[in-house]
Image (cartoon, rainbow, N blue to C red):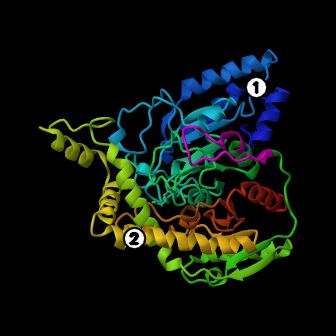
Amino acid sequence: MAYNSIQATQAALERGEVKTTDLVGEYLAAINEHAHLNIYVEVFAEEAMRIAKRQDEARAQGARLGKMAGVILSIKDVICYEGHAVSAGSKILEGFVSPYTATALQRLLDEDVIVIGRTNCDEFAMGSGNENSFYGPTRNAADVTRVPGGSSGGAAVSVQAGTCLLAMGSSTGGSVRQPASFCGLFGFKPTYGRISRHGLIAYGSSFDQIGYLANNPQDIALALQLSAGADMYDATAPNKILPAYSTQPAETEPKSIAYFADLMESEALAPEIRAAMQKTFAKFEAAGHKMVPVKFSYFDYVVPAYYVLTTAEASSNLSRFDGMRYGHRAQDANNLNETYTKSRTEGFGTEVQRRILLGTFVLSSGYYDAYYGKAQKVRRLIRDQLQGILDAHDFILMPVSPSAPWPIGEQTDDPVANYLADIYTVLANLAGLPAAAIPVETDSPLPVGYQLMADQWEEGKLLQFMRGMSIDA
Ligand code: GLN
């Protein structure tokens, strides 16, 4: 039987109770059993088995293995892995094979992690339900008629359905926390710059961060510790001291926790979310934490600012997919311009096209100041106000999403409804702050989580607190 933490897995391997090849075999069986959930775009079955065998042999000979030995990881289909296809859930990258490996992944490979496959996601990570993938929707294992969240939907279900131990995802506006919450997992987005973006296919470069989805905070702490830190290929990953997250103790000392009072009771929250928030609030109070109501003045501007800025960045980032350099090229084009137009029209899905058009519009001369320039100012105001709150308090408590996982297909004709549901997660990306989704024990059949946001570079403090809260859970 597969184990549900890195520590338990490695202890069992060391005791000789199980072999790495057995683990891979079980995960591959789980992948087959859950094929109807459409979790993976590609499974690296043979390769994973081959590496597992090599690790077992090395272990038998007494060799010292890396800190991720025996850990089976899934990677979202936006993470580059040398010699492996990567498509960002898009037809436009059809047949593209990555010539190099993302820094974060390379660091885990150097510690003997085993990659079992690449997971389905919204095309170019644009979406909240995994319904915008060229490969079709991924299904929530808790209720197959519902979305698993997005854009790292496949990543979330890969762990939820027991097809791997840990998932590497990415977050531009909530794509790790929201699917984690929809699937009953821990999801973690670090401070902007904590993990190198080298080898992560770009969506909104000033927002994008690699993050992890796991069964517990300890697994996230180890993965973060091993994959984060300065990188010569990403100037936004600064040369800061990297704490040893995995050995920091669980923390249960009383904390000062800010919350937005009007939001806790808000009618805009689905009843099960409101109930989960109230339950979390009561649990925090019972644990001796000081709950402090605070005000945030910009909720009306959060989603518009996010969508103006990210579509602008996306329109620029996605201009490289032109039919000439990567992936799909239209067959019946007669000149260069026609090749660009036809390849992009055939290669990109509806949502990606919508966002490229929107982003090109907000950047166009005559509208730049009114939209892009203004949204940048709003971003600054949002960041300053959140910073003020975090100067006075340890964490901010919020819902992850105002809604529970919705039925597949329900929101496809209403992109704005989809965008509005991102309101609580995009805040951390707008401000570059670390944030986590933490599951709530609930009687409802659909999983739900709450969100905690911390100050810049305080991942360690947040993870310690998460461990403290999950011990007495
Ligand atoms: N749902 C948000 C969007 O569509 C966030 C996606 C993400 O974090 N990649 O942009």
Residue drawn at x 65%, y 43% as measured from the top left: 166
Furthest toward the left, the residue is 334
- Is the magenta region chiefly helix, strand or loop? loop
Q: Circle 2 sits in a helix, a strand or a loop, which is it?
A: helix
Residue type, numbered disc 1: Leu
Q: Is residue 371 visible?
A: yes
Q: Circle 1 sits in a helix, a strand or a loop, which is it?
A: loop
Furthest toward the top, the residue is 61
Q: Is residue 96 left or right of residue 166?
A: left
Residue drawn at x 61%, y 56% as measured from the top left: 180
Question: On the image, numbered disc 1 is attached to which residue?
Answer: 65
Residue 276's x, y, as percent? 68, 72
Residue type, numbered disc 2: Val
Q: Is residue 276 visible?
A: no
Q: Nearer the viewer, residue 424 or 205?
A: 205
| Picture disc at residue 251 | none
183 w.r.t. 54: above or below: below
- Using the rendered view, name the quadrant where residue 177 is placed: bottom right
Residue 175's x, y, as percent? 53, 56
Q: Nearer the viewer, residue 269 or 170?
A: 170
Q: Is residue 233 left or right of residue 294?
A: left
In the rendered image, which quarter contains the C terminus? bottom right
Which stretch is magenta? 225-246
Residue drawn at x 37%, y 63% as measured from the top left: 412
Residue 386's x, y, as percent? 63, 72
- Using the rendered view, name the quadrant where residue 163 is placed: top right
Q: Is residue 174 magenta?
A: no
Question: On the image, numbered disc 2 is attached to which residue?
Answer: 416
